[in-house]
Amino acid sequence: MQIECVINDQKTVLEANAGELLADTLRARGLLSVRKGCDTACCGLCTVWIDGKPTLSCAVPVFRAQGKHITTIEGVSEEAAAFARLLAAEGAEQCGFCSPGFIMTVLAMKRELKNPTEADIVHYLTGNLCRCTGYMGQMRAVKKYLGVAS
Amino acid sequence: MYTIAGLAQPDTLEEAYRILLHRRTNAILGGCAYLRLGRRKIGTAIDLSKLSLNYIIETEARVEIGAMATLREIETHPALRSLYDGMLTKAVGNIIGVQFRNVATVGGSVFSRYGFSDLITALLALDSEVELYKQGWLALTDFLARPFERDILVRISIKKDGRRAAYHSLRNSASDYPLLNVAVSRHDDAWRIAVGARPNVAVLAPQAAAQLAAGAGSPEGIAAVARAAASELTFGSNMRASASYRQAMCQVLVKRAVLEVLSCR
């Protein structure tokens, strides 16, 4: 089947099977930032935006992308780089495997929440499980990025 | 891994229902969040995306939630943050993560009657009704008690009756599935106590609720209500908790929820 959608601001027609999952289709198109880490729809590594909402692309059949705007980290590279610099400055970046999904969630949070508290931030990021280097450094970087560092 | 042989995106509920009955392997899709965890062989997958069922509408008398509304839409709906003392917001807020809740739908959660469901427990305490395409309107209590029947969940309706409510769940870790959840509501002197993740699907504890209706407001009375709920319900064991642990924790959660409702002003 054919699915018309916009991927990273480019109109695209996807060729896919009815049962195919969005994460697999995106990876097959070379968007290798989209990773599957858990096989149980809970780790958050595969996070992409569908119409701006952070979504588990490993749990969404690709036909649900019809008519939608799909954004991966490749589509927001400048913002991602700006946050990545903050992460690195806090010593909060190591192997990087989980980073694309984590960063997509942080960028989505910046758009969705206004002046979040630490509890709001933790709540929003709960769906990103893999966090090597530790949560404290990441929290410092996230707070700076969101402009709520004390 | 699941398979889907064909996809239908009908324009009407009537057509969706006709396709559903056409073959045993045909199935209505919800948010599909759990689809890949199973091995279902679906003939024609029926996607309801074109039926405009992703809404939450607040009227003067009711809140209506369409089957395709997501759990995240419940969580972030401004009116639901205050209605029912924010119980629905709280109930869905610990389900996996934001990205999962942007996928999982109300229809998929309720129609599937998942035992671990946080949403069903909360809706049960709120005396919700469900509209099914074929069976029509049913009290959620009746829907959950009926044998499974092929149908389409269209929407959920909750009365705005000034009900006060509280929700508590117990999880081994944040965002994990609950090993027990409890929702309590009070409308005048009528109480509802719903207990889910027993690990079976949520049910009401009517005897304990009746004790509250009779005015068991003292600390001893509430403790007795909590014991009554834990003894009138059945509990089972699974990887998250044993039956006896669930039964013990049921008392704790019921007590906390009742105290919270009593303190609602």
Image (cartoon, coloured by chain):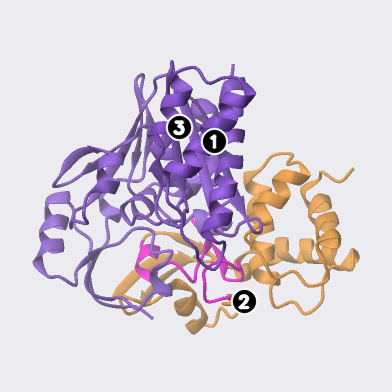
Quarter of the figure with the N terminus of chain B: bottom left
Q: Which residue is mark 1?
A: B226
Density class for disc 3 (Cα within 10 Å; few <14, some 14-19, many ≥20) is many
In the image, the chain rendered in purple is B
From the viewer's side, name the closer residue of B172 and B205: B205
From the viewer's side, name the closer residue of B47 and B210: B210
Chain letter for mark 1, please: B
Height in image: B149 above or below B227? below
How far across and down, in percent of the image, does residue B104 sit? 44, 56
How far apart are the two marked residues, 3 and 1, measured between alpha carbons?
7 Å
In the image, the chain rendered in orange is A
Disc 3 to disc 1: CB gap under 8 Å? yes
User: In percent of the image, x 64 and y 59: which residue is there?
Assistant: B172
**Could you say which disc has been placed on residue A33 in the image?**
2
How far apart are the two marked residues, 3 and 2, measured between alpha carbons?
53 Å
Height in image: A50 above or below A99? above
Q: Which residue is mark 3?
A: B208
How far apart are the two marked residues, 2 and 1, measured between alpha carbons?
50 Å
Amino acid under label 3? Answer: Ala
Density class for disc 2 (Cα within 10 Å; few <14, some 14-19, many ≥20) is many
Residue A45 falls within the magenta-colored stretch: yes
Amino acid under label 2? Answer: Ser
User: In percent of the image, x 45 and y 72: which residue is there?
Assistant: A22
